[in-house]
Image (cartoon, rainbow, N blue to C red):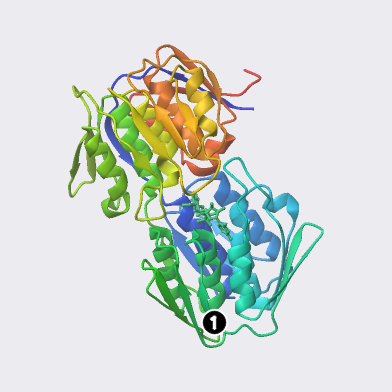
């Protein structure tokens, strides 16, 4: 299995271009199942999760073509060959569950393996299923599979107990072809939901209010093909912002929507990082600055994103003074703490909070990626640590970051990818 060898980095400098958002492109690819027409998607990031979603669509009967750059996908689903997503595919990527809504809406049935828990928590899908039921679907769970059938889907008023990103997306996609109006209350407000709604509206759907907590969908009988450019990845943006801070560097980050990273900007400003939001992109500088501690609490958007929590924690281990990080979105998203502690961070967990003493000179060590964002945190910590850090299980990182090592190297970091046999 491949690893990264990360050496202590000089201050990063230069420019970096952010790729399309993983969490936007996955539901958009799933939404392409809603029509027999071709859908053309631009700014598709080169990620393992995108390959898995592509494999899943092909399994259902889509043809998927990409251009030489891989940044443009053409998806055509003339006919759905099978409505079943087998366990082997779903376990490769939890977001496979996003096919449930489109399959149900297009064919009236779907059979999808239950994704099960993962490193950051149990992650149930009860809210997705409750919403489908309210739209008239019959749901059965048998032998580890969810079977959904609905000869006719009807619009409904659905209140989500939690503003779940995946449930909001699945239900919007399903409601787009349901008969009548659907109102989703307490919907998730993430920018990726707005991007999905924009794509669906280009396909002829009638989705209003995406980005607020009430989304109204007027069902239409059919959808047509559309062309769409995926928004920039706000978590990749945040990760590079932290990289500039942790190495005391100065970088320009291009292709960003600064509004989408407001909570990260706010926290880094509190830490004393210099940030300029200009026409060219975001300039992030921490050269010659003593950085300060700050407290963080993860929340649904527009709160501080849970997907940036491990990376910020890596930074906070190095700043001058103690910080507290509280995780409220996932119940078990502190797996990276023991890895950071192997590097000398001395973090203590109590319930949902982690106390970080700060002011540590991290030392390079052998660490593992416990999940995608935790993996990014290990690379960041490795760039700040004395000596050599060996980051293993980097397939997690490759699920969700486009050419992470290459991009960091172009800014002056020392990161080498090696296969275990080397
Ligand atoms: C998405 C993102 C993920 C991000 C997360 C939270 C994608 C592909 N993934 O995941 O990167 O970390 O949002 O911002 O977009 N929950 C339930 N019942 C449900 C659904 C969710 O209890 O039916 C709970 C989850 O266990 C979790 C919380 O709600 O504790 C948030 O989950 P959710 O917003 O659904 O995250 P995902 O869509 O899985």
Q: Please name the residue that numbered disc 1 is placed on.
A: 156
Residue 91 vs residue 74: left or right?
right
User: Which quarter of the rendered picture does the C terminus lie within?
Assistant: top right
- The reply to whether the residue tagged 1 has its Cβ within 8 angstroms of ligand 1 is no
Residue 166, position in %: x, y?
A: 53, 60
Foreground residue among 248 and 49: 248
- Taking the spot 57% from the left edge, 33% from the top edge, the residue there is 370
Question: What SS does tag 1 mark?
Answer: loop
Foreground residue among 141 and 27: 141
| Most distant residue in the front direction | 350
Q: For residue 358, what is the image quadrant?
A: top left
Is the residue 60 above or below the residue 367 in the image?
Answer: below
| Most distant residue in the top direction | 387
Residue 2 vs residue 81: left or right?
left
Is the residue 261 above or below the residue 334 in the image?
Answer: below
Q: For residue 108, what is the image quadrant?
A: bottom right
Residue 245, position in %: x, y?
A: 29, 30
Is the residue 388 above or below the residue 104 in the image?
Answer: above
């Amino acid at each position: 299995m491949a690893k990264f060898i990360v050496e202590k980095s000089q201050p990063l400098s230069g420019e970096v271009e952010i790729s399309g958002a993983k969490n936007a492109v996955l539901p958009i690819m799933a939404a392409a199942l809603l029509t027999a027409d071709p859908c053309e998607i631009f700014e598709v990031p080169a990620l393992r999760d995108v390959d898995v979603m592509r494999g899943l669509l092909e399994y259902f009967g889509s043809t998927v073509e990409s251009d030489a750059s891989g940044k443009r996908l053409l998806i055509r689903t003339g006919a759905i060959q099978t409505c079943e997503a087998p366990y082997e595919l779903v376990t490769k990527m939890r977001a496979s569950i996003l096919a449930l809504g489109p399959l149900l809406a297009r064919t009236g049935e779907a059979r999808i393996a239950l994704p099960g828990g993962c490193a950051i928590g149990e992650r149930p899908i009860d809210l997705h299923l409750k919403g489908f039921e309210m739209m008239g679907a019959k749901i059965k769970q048998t032998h580890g599979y969810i079977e959904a059938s609905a000869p006719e889907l009807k619009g409904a008023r659905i209140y989500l107990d939690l503003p779940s990103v995946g449930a909001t997306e699945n239900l919007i996609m399903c409601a787009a072809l349901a008969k009548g109006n659907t109102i989703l209350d307490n919907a998730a407000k993430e920018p990726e939901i707005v991007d999905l709604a924009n794509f669906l509206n280009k396909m002829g759907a009638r989705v209003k209010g995406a980005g607020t907590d009430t989304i109204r969908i007027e069902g239409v009988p059919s959808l047509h093909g559309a062309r769409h450019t995926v928004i920039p990845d706000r978590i990749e943006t945040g990760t590079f912002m932290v990289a500039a801070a942790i190495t005391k560097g100065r970088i320009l980050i291009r292709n960003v929507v600064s509004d989408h990273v407001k909570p990260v900007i706010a926290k880094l400003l509190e830490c004393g990082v210099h940030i300029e939001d200009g026409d060219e992109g975001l300039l992030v500088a921490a050269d010659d600055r003593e950085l300060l501690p700050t407290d963080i609490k993860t929340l649904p958007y527009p709160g501080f994103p849970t997907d940036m929590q491990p990376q910020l924690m890596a930074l906070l281990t190095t700043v001058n003074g103690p910080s507290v990080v509280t995780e409220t979105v996932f119940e078990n998203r502190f797996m990276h703490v023991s890895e950071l502690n192997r590097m000398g961070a001395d973090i203590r967990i109590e319930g949902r909070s982690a106390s970080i003493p700060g002011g540590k000179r991290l030392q390079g060590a052998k660490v593992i990626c416990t999940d995608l964002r935790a993996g990014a945190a290990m690379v960041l910590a490795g760039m700040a640590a004395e000596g050599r850090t060996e980051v293993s299980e980097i397939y997690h990182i490759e699920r969700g970051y486009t050419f992470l090592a290459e991009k960091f190297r172009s800014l002056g970091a020392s990161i080498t990818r090696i296969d275990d046999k080397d």
